[in-house]
Image (cartoon, rainbow, N blue to C red):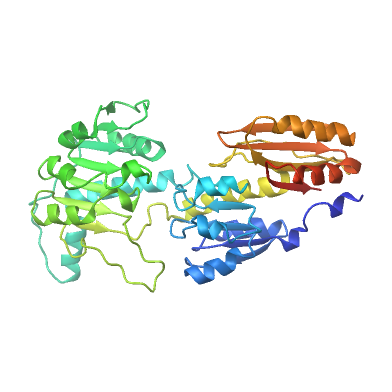
């Protein structure tokens, strides 16, 4: 059998990139011969459903939700790319149960978010946005009242991962004291000091900045009780996820004068695109910086994210590698060289006892020549990759389709 006719034709692979994914992502996909469709915003549910019906790869950012019911209506979907850090917008467990790996870019916009956070720390302490608004209105107020240096102030970082630790380094370079709290033990950078509880951090920090994921445990992590326990005159920054802060409670705390200011880049409800109005109880409150989810939106970060996620997707589609996937076992695979290369069979299956034995029995029964085998499992899914002699590959794949535990099987080359 000619090897060129084994894989699904690249020109028929339909890639859908949503929410203005950087052009670098589309360029990489197109360079592989894939058919790429790019949209500048998050589509409405009907449009999204229609796109998913024919998509083999879909790329989203933070707006587009891919819940269980939509994944069930995407019969051709092979992989999902989250062109951002977070993956909570995707039903990860359900995607895994369908043999759909999900890839993200956990590090690519780290610096951009950290720099925005530091800029907001300074801007809040100097009242820069309010001063600028006054100047645009023709008002000259050179008073130093309420303006402070950040040197010597205490920054409390909630979530000391990739972003939080970079914020820590930048803040110390400006002479700030840094304390942090994380549910996972983290090695402190520089002179940063870990605190055992969130309550300890809130009482000690002049600035509280949040860098945690969206999980049930972090929903309304900062509510009325936590805001009351913060130092009088402190400021709050949320460049993490909109669900982490109770914005109504925050608005009350700011209006009462308990907090001196806040900066938010993420919100519980965000517009789907430019045409939709932004509504929030925080609008119009002095000393509050509101930005439209642009923490990672620098040209450098978006290009790096697009490259990172697109390359992971390409490695999966072309080679079978799941390295970097957040919901399926990670298997790194070598590329095969030469015209006589084996056919590669990719097999997702439910991780129950006896599946591997069944697969080996099939290989033995068919007398198939297998030159390499790769296997990784997690709690409920296994991923096996077989490099089979071209003359044996098709019959092995067809037999594997009939194994009751098979989720999905695909052949390359």
Q: Is residue 373 left or right of 328 when viewed as pictured?
A: right
- Any part of residue 39 in sight: no
Residue at the bottom extreme of this rendering: 275
Above or below residue 61? Residue 217 is: above
Residue 225 falls in which quadrant of the image? top left
211 displayed left or right of 125: right
Please state the horizontal and vertical placement of residue 346, each as a whole percent of the image.
Answer: 72, 43
Q: Name the residue nearer the viewer: 392 or 319.
A: 392
Residue 197's spot in the image, x, y percent? 24, 30
Does the image show residue 394?
Answer: yes
Task: Give the residue displayed 81% in from the left and 31% down from the top.
Answer: 361
Numbered marks: total? 0
Nearest to the observer: residue 16 or residue 136? 16
Question: Residue 411 at x, y = what percent?
Answer: 77, 47
Q: Nearer the viewer, residue 387 or 292?
A: 387
- Quick check: 309 left or right of 212? right
Estimate the x, y position of residue 39 in percent, counting from the top left. 53, 68
Q: Residue at x 24, y 46 (%)?
A: 121
Task: State the residue at coordinates (52%, 50%).
Answer: 305
Q: Height in image: 29 above or below 198?
A: below
Q: Image quarter for residue 289?
A: bottom left
In the image, 87: left or right of 276?
A: right
């Amino acid at each position: 059998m000619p090897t060129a006719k084994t894989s699904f034709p690249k020109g028929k692979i339909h890639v859908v990139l949503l929410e203005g994914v950087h052009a670098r992502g589309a360029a990489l996909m197109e360079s592989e011969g894939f058919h790429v469709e790019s949209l500048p915003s998050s589509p409405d549910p009907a449009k999204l459903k229609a796109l998913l019906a024919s998509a083999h790869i879909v790329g989203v950012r933070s707006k587009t939700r891919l819940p269980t019911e939509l994944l069930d209506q995407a019969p051709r979907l092979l992989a999902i790319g989250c062109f951002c850090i977070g993956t909570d917008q995707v039903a990860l467990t359900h995607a895994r149960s369908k043999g759909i790996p999900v890839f993200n870019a956990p590090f690519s916009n780290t610096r951009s978010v950290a720099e925005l956070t530091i800029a907001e720390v300074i801007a809040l302490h100097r009242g820069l946005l309010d001063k600028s608004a006054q100047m645009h209105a023709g008002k000259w107020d050179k008073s130093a009242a309420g303006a402070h240096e950040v040197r010597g102030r205490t920054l409390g970082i909630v979530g000391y991962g990739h972003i939080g630790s970079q914020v820590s380094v930048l803040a110390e370079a400006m002479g700030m004291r840094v304390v942090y709290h994380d549910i996972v033990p983290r090695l402190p950078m520089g002179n940063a000091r870990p605190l055992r509880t969130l309550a300890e951090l809130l009482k000690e920090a002049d600035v509280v900045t949040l860098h945690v994921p969206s999980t049930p445990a972090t929903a309304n992590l900062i509510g009325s009780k936590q805001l009351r326990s913060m130092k009088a005159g402190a400021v709050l920054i949320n460049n993490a996820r909109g669900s982490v802060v109770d914005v109504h409670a925050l608005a009350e705390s700011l209006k009462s004068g308990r907090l001196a200011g806040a900066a938010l880049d993420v919100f519980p409800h965000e517009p789907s695109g430019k045409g939709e109005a932004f509504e929030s109880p925080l609008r119009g409150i002095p000393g509050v910086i509101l930005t439209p989810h642009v923490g990672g939106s620098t040209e450098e970060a978006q290009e790096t994210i697009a490259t990172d996620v697109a390359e992971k997707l390409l490695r999966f589609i072309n080679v079978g590698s799941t390295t970097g996937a957040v919901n399926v076992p990670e298997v790194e695979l070598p590329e095969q060289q030469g015209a006589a290369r084996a056919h590669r069979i990719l097999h997702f299956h439910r991780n129950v006892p006896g599946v591997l034995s069944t697969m080996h029995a099939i290989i033995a029964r068919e007398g198939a020549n297998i030159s390499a085998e790769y296997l990784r499992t997690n709690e409920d899914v296994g991923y096996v990759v077989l490099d089979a002699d071209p003359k044996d590959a098709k019959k092995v794949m067809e037999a594997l389709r009939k194994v009751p535990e098979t989720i999905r099987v695909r052949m390359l080359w």
